[in-house]
Structures are given as structure tokens and as C-alpha cells.
Image (cartoon, helix red, strand yellow):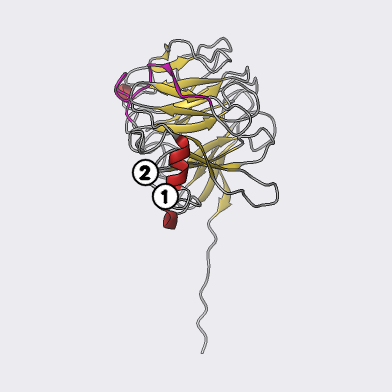
Amino acid sequence: MAFVRNSANIQKRVAIRIPSFCYDAGWRVDKHTRLVADTTGNKLGDLVGFGEMGVWISRNNGDNTFQTPKIALPNFSYAAGWRVEKHLRFMADIRNLGRADIVGFGDDGVFVSLNNGDGTFSPVRLVTTSFGYNSSGWRLEKHLRFLVTNGNGLLDIVGFGENQVEVAYNNGDGTFQSSIGLLEDFCYGHTWGIGHHPRLFADLTGDGKPDLVGFSHRGVEVAFNNGDGAFQIKRHVLDDFGEGSSSRGWHFEKHPRFVADLTGNGCGDIIGFGDEGVYVAINNGDGTFQPTKFALKKKKFQMVVGG
């Protein structure tokens, strides 16, 4: 993947053209990723845009206004070969310093640019040849990839590949270990599809470790975290929230589903936005769930026609 150089010339060329991150300034959903992240460590969300010629950042002033965007890095951009339909890009604090670094899943693997803490970023470097479009055959339409902490405050790279879930553990200094297989399930080769079967990580037992949660055709499946970097065999925990699991008929194009702690006990509950309202399955505290119930019903309106 080619890198774009001479950031001073780039900023001069596009500063007038891209004064903000909006459509009228030339930003397009199919070309330019835009995110919100704390880039300074002051706990305020800044605006970050992966634009035509580089990464632009607009710092938060702390009073609901933002500074004029400045180019922070002439890379991870459309001109440098990064494409929305091929390459994931994240802002994430991979060293646990309180400020976001840049992480991109490119053609040749995972690239990182570390945050220097002064509004600048280090030169881009390849940290692993796994999880890449060309290097390992990872595809957005088939393979999910996440940055997940295993409870030590450091974000590891986790990917749902063709036949197994893989992880590259974080060394804590912006580098990663070689990827290894975690689990032979929840993957494309095991009939899990990107749209039809959402998968995510959430703490279901309150131990501070992320468990693997998948919404299969027949309901909710879980692989519990052993706490040592390994996961247990998949377990079916709920006959609901799957496309064929209940009469409610859950479909990916209509019904978002999430895991969040609704009771404050540190254990994730299941929330689904269905046809008739919002449904919830409360966690018993051990990764098992109570029967699904309505949390918010659809309101019925009566139209009165008067004369």
C-alpha cells in the first residue's frame, strides 16, 4: 500500500477544499470514514476524518465547539489506497494511555500510527500481516474484526475468519504478537453470515472478561471466557433474538440487537428492537437469561376525525 508524503503540501492543497467534514466540503460516505475519539487524553471527543489526502482532526474546545480541522497524518486516506469497502479503520487507545491511536486493517495486514500526545502521530508501521485483505484474505462481507480487551486494559485484535476466531495479543507498546486460533466456531465457514448473525463481545458473568456472544438462526449462543485467554465451547443460552428462533421474526435489516448492562450488576443483558417494541432478556448473573419480555411497547394511536 503506497504512503502519501509531504504533508505540508497536502494541507496547503486541501485546506480550503475541506474546511469541515461535511458533504458540501467533498466528504462522501462511500469514500471517507469519520469517527469521534479522544486524541488528546482530556476525555473530550474530537472529530476525526479519514479524507481524500490524509487524516484530519478537529479538536474539541470543551464548550460544544470544535477547532478548525488540521491534517494529522498523510496516510490511511483514499489517495493512499484505503477503501471503505475493503479496509476498516479505527481510533483506539492501544497502549492504555488515555489517547487514541490510529489502527487500520489494510491490504497487507494491520497498520498502526501511534499518538504522540501533541496532536501529531508517528509514522505508519505494519504490526501484523494477519487480518489483511491481500495478506490473509479477510473480507468485510465475510469476516468481522474487533479491538477487544481481555481485562488487562490493552486492546487485542480479534477476527472472525473463515473457519476460526483468531486473536493477536497486544504487547502494550503498540505492537502485537502473531495471531493464533481461539475457537473453531462463529465463523463464515460454520454458516455464520455478516448480516444475518451479529456477533460481539460482552461481559456476561461480571468477572471483567469479555465473553463471545452470537445471534444465530436459532437464538443466542455464547462462548464464555475462561479468564486465561481461552474460551469454552459454544453454549446455547436463549431461544430468542435469532431469525428462526421465535414467532417475532428477527431480521438483520430491520431489528438491531445489543448486549448492555441494564441492571447495574456488571453482567450484560440482551436488548432487541423488534416489530412491536423493545424486548429485553435479563441476565441472571451467570450468563443465563430470564425469558424475553417487553421493555417498551409500540404505542397505539387513535385518529379522531371531527367535523
Residue lying at 54% horizontally and 46% vertically, measured from the top left? 69
Q: Nearer the viewer, residue 104 or 157?
A: 104
Q: In the depicted view, which residue is nearer to us: 185 or 104?
A: 104
- Is residue 232 inside the magenta stretch? no
Q: Where residue 217 appears, x then y in whole percent?
A: 37, 33
Residue type indicated by callout 2: Lys
Contact flag, marks 2 and 1 (Cβ < 8 Å): yes
Q: Which residues are magenta?
A: 122-139
Which quadrant of the figure contains the N terminus?
A: top left
Percent x, y for residue 280?
56, 41
* Viewer-nearest residue: 216 or 133: 133
Q: Give the amino acid type for the residue marked by disc 1 in the picture.
A: Trp
| Magenta segment includes 135 | yes
Pick whichever, 177 or 272, lies toward us.
177
Residue 255 seen from this side:
no
| 253 horizontally vs 230: left or right | left
Q: Residues within 10 Å of mark 1 (few under 14, many from 20)?
A: some
Q: How many marks overall?
A: 2
Which of the 4 quarters of the picture holds residue 267? top right
The quadrant holding residue 58 is top right
- The secondary structure making up most of the magenta span is loop
Question: In this picture, is 109 found above or below 120?
Answer: above
Instruction: Tell me where residue 237 appears, x and y as whole percent.
Output: 50, 26
Density class for disc 2 (Cα within 10 Å; few <14, some 14-19, many ≥20) is some
Return the mark for residue 27: 1
Q: Residue 62's spot in the image, x, y percent?
A: 70, 47
Helix, strand or loop at label 2? It is loop
Tell me the residue at 53%/48% (across/down): 278
